[in-house]
Amino acid sequence: MTHKDRRSFKFWQELKRRNVPRVLAIYAGTAFIILEAADIIFPRWGFPDWTVDMVLYVLLVGAVISGILSWIYDISPGGIVKTAPGEVGKAEAYRRPERGKKPMASNIIIAVLIVLIGVLMYPKIFKNSASPLNGKNRSSIAVLPLKIIGDDAELSFFASGLVESLTHMLSKVGNSEQSFSVIPPSEILEAITAGEARKKFGVSLVISGSIQMDQSSSRLILNLIDAKTQNLIRSEKLDYSTEKNLIIQDEVISVMVSMLGLELEGETKKQITLGGSSLYSANELYLTGRGMLREGLETQEEFDGALDLFLSAIEKDSLFAMAYAGAAQAYTYKYHFTLDPVWNDESLKYSRKAVELNNQDAYALMSLAASLVEKGAYDEALQYYEESKNIDSSRANIYSELAYLYEMKGEMGKAEHHHNIAIELDPDSHLSHYYLGGFYYYQVKYEEATRVFEKALELSPGHLTIMHALGACYYELEHFNDAIHMFEEILEQDSAQGQVLLNLGNIYLYQQHYEKSIAYYQEALRYTPKNYSLHSALGKAYLWSENRSLAHESFQNAIDIGHQDMSCSDIQFATWFGLMGKLDSADFYLESFDLPDNPEVLEANAAYMIGELYLILERETLAFPYIESALKRGFGWKDVKYSPFYKALEDNEDFQEIVARSE
């Protein structure tokens, strides 16, 4: 043994005598547990990612301090004492022959333990990011909104549509590879950082970037970011020329997959591009329209703008399945806005064509199912929803739409269950909360609806549709001043809101401000001229203000429009004829309606309408059971309090008993 070897041996023996290796091994094991706990717990508590790194640095400093202290001090029965120095030149004294080979075994155990802990902590210290997808755990990815370079307003819609298209395509790749999942595009509508995406969605990777476009070319920059460390892993710059007729999302998805260290197989590429167009011009129109739908449409002008883009894309490529699906959804929005059944017919036509061209896309299947629900074809709609769910079960809006279907079928338990699934899948979605609020609203649970709508508005401040729903709750709860304030705030942003104008007309009707009521109804007719309920409300305003000729004209308009709308019932026709004094016609429609013996089997609004009709026909004895049934279920109270039809019943003891029992 050389002099140098003897010195090293003596130093190692001195380390062992002072228990330095044992202390460091125990410290390393404890430090590893602490670091793993911090890595799991800190992000859930909302701590920034650098706090985990700070724990690592503190533990490394602590290791040095522990080694120094274990060299200087020792733990004895008398407490912590300074370690006595060893005698130089007496290395043999450290040997204990009587204990056999245990010192050698102890050395091996300590060495193995140090190596093992070192291997485990190496990735924590050096953060090797060579492979974004490590293959051991299923990674989660978020595609963030693109930053717009320039001030082109339309480019923002194009970029939003591109992000949604890319997210859906990347989801299909992830499902095929079984190596990563993608956060649904409906959950990420606002610009957020990689750290915020990790905190909110628990993702491991983030794809962000920017887009710049002019008339002849575009530049797209993509960044793949480690969401935990917020370090840039890879970056790609893509330049396109419209003259080359490149389909931008087809090119970008190939680059994104390459950035993840994967190869886009031929069959997978065929599946993710199925239903698209090979024409750049058609695709650009589609993506812009898709972006408008994604950002949210609230005015008729916006509906028509998105619809025109989809129809223009179809004109350029008649086999563009996704453009047909986009047009179908735009028509559905327009139907909900105007209540004109012709738009739902158009939605059904375009959605059937979309599915005919591509029956493997969840978006197209959902568009068709939604149109079928509005037509009352619930079983067929359910079939398409189930097919859509089998393709992509992670989309919260599938469950929201399924809930609406079950509402229409009268299966309220299933409806509420599916609404709650949607919120569990996407707790920060204003739409999921909005749909649940709508469910409670139509169940006449206005307090619950108000609470949920307020949460939805908190998630999406200034959203006109949610504001309208919340105003409707205030209206139903007879908080008229709050409702007027909410509705007028909506009209300040968009004066063409027909349903809002109708609601304001109703409030002023109940407050007996007939001129204001009539003015709002007439203004509403400019935007929703084929709404029979609006014509009926205007007729009542004229009737209550004792203008019978204009009242009859409005009721006749309601009748003419109602004959063209399958949703209009015979009871409504009978009511309008009764209000016009045409009692024979009222009786004709009343007799054609199959009245049940028990009013409880009817929906609350139907029971109230029948009771009101009997009052108009001066058949009070028949009217009271239906009115009582409706009142007990929370329907009709405002009319009982404010309508002239009930003024004559203020001294009717039987009716007052009904009111008292129903409260």
Image (cartoon, rainbow, N blue to C red):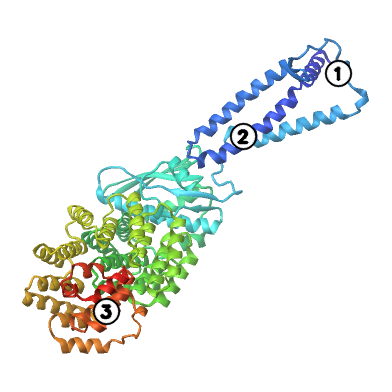
The image shows residue 484, relative to residue 618, as above or below, that is above
State the image coordinates of residue 374 (x, y, percent, origin top left). 33, 73
Identity of the residue drawn at 19% across and 64% down: 498
| Residue 574 appears in view | yes
Q: Which residue is mark 3?
A: 624
State the image coordinates of residue 553 (x, y, percent, origin top left). 10, 77
State the image coordinates of residue 163 (x, y, percent, origin top left). 38, 52
Instruction: Identify which amino acid the numbered label 3 is placed on.
Output: Phe
Distance in Å between CA atoms under marks 1 and 2: 35 Å
| Residue 128 appears in view | no
Query: Toward the viewer: 43 or 654?
Result: 654
Q: Is residue 610 left or right of residue 33?
A: left
Nearer to us of marks 1 and 3 is: 3
- Residue neighbourhood size for the residue with mark 2, other residues' Cα within 10 Å, grouped as few (<14), some (14–19), many (≥20): some
Distance in Å between CA atoms under marks 2 and 3: 72 Å
The numbered mark at residue 103 is none
Secondary structure beneath label 1: helix
N-terminal of the pair, mark 2 or mark 3, is 2
Tell me, yes or no, whether the two marked residues, 1 and 3, touch with CB atoms within 8 Å: no
The numbered mark at residue 94 is 1
Q: Quadrant of the C terminus?
A: bottom left
Instruction: Identify which amino acid the numbered label 1 is placed on.
Output: Tyr
Query: Toward the viewer: 342 or 579?
Result: 579
- Residue neighbourhood size for the residue with mark 3, other residues' Cα within 10 Å, grouped as few (<14), some (14–19), many (≥20): many
Secondary structure beneath label 2: helix
Query: Toward the viewer: 632 or 371?
Result: 632
Residue 303, image quadrant: bottom left
Q: Which residue is mark 2?
A: 34
Secondary structure beneath label 3: helix
Instruction: Identify which amino acid the numbered label 2 is placed on.
Output: Ile
Query: Toward the viewer: 229 or 258?
Result: 229
Nearer to us of marks 1 and 2 is: 2
